[in-house]
Image: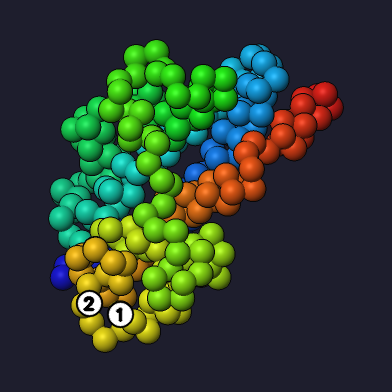
Amino acid sequence: MAPASANVRRAAIGARKKIENFPTELDLTMQFVKWTAESLEAVHDEEKVAALREASREMAGLQESLRLHVAALSEVEIGRLAPNEGQTFAEVLHSRTMELAAQDPRTPEDYEGFKAFNKAVWDVNHKGELMPGEEEEDIVMTSKDLVANAHCPLSMKAVEELDEPVCARDCRHIYEAMNARDYFGQGLRSCAVAGCNKQVNVSVLVSDSRLVRDLQELKRNKRGGRHTQHAEDYTALDDED
């Protein structure tokens, strides 16, 4: 490997490590914003809901920018992308990020986080009704369970009570990490959830931002609904200003 290429890859790895926790932190912040907006929608505080909707839109845009940035960094890391003569690492990364965005153009209304916000707020007073512009298949999709399995098939603990939850990347079935490492530690085995034929080993066990978000939402739902304290906290902060 040429010294220049090695340096670029090291730079990509370093950059990715610096931002790898941002998506999870952003997911959790967007979740809090969504919960607060639900509580405010329930008391018909339209002005504050509108402010939170705009905040959610901006965060969803940042989430999309992070996704594209990480994808471009990954291409540099594996050697699929390298600077031409005279190009800097930053120029290569920016150029590829723009190319990826052009290949899959989206508006904020297409971003999953922003769609989830709008759906959650709508459901406060219109549960079971179609949103403006929504199709029947969207209702079916959003009514599915948040998680793929309710209990770890190895420990039999409820997934929201696991000490260290992980999931298989392909099927999204959730396990207690310690049990999963023991069970899949010898190589590829079929997923331990009955009826699932996906092949799993320890390398595909992940704890990503989607899993963290879904388990947080599951815990919240089982506690019985909206976090009214979030709305009270938001109003208190607003009053201080």
Would you call the spot at circle 1 few (<14 residues within 10 Å), some (14-19), or many (20 or more)?
some
Looking at the rendering, in which quadrant would you find the N terminus?
A: bottom left
Residue at 33% from the left image edge and 49% from the top image edge: 70
Q: Which residue is drawn at 21% across and 77% down?
A: 188
- The type of colouring in the image is rainbow
Q: Is mark 1 on a helix, strand or loop?
A: helix
Query: Can residue 8 be seen here?
Result: no
Instruction: Please state, as top left, top right, bottom left or bottom right, where the C terminus lies in the image.
Output: top right
Q: Looking at the picture, does residue 213 appear above or below residue 116?
A: below
**Quick check: 62 left or right of 46?**
left
The residue shown at (39%, 58%) is 149
Which disc is residue 20 wearing? Answer: none
Q: Mark 2 points at which residue?
A: 189
Look at mark 1 in the image and give the residue it sits on: 184
As shown in the figure, which amino acid type bears the numbered disc 1? Phe
Label 2 environment density (alpha carbons within 10 Å; few <14, some 14–19, many ≥20): some
Residue that protrudes farthest toward the right in the picture = 240
Is the residue 210 above or below the residue 99 in the image?
Answer: below
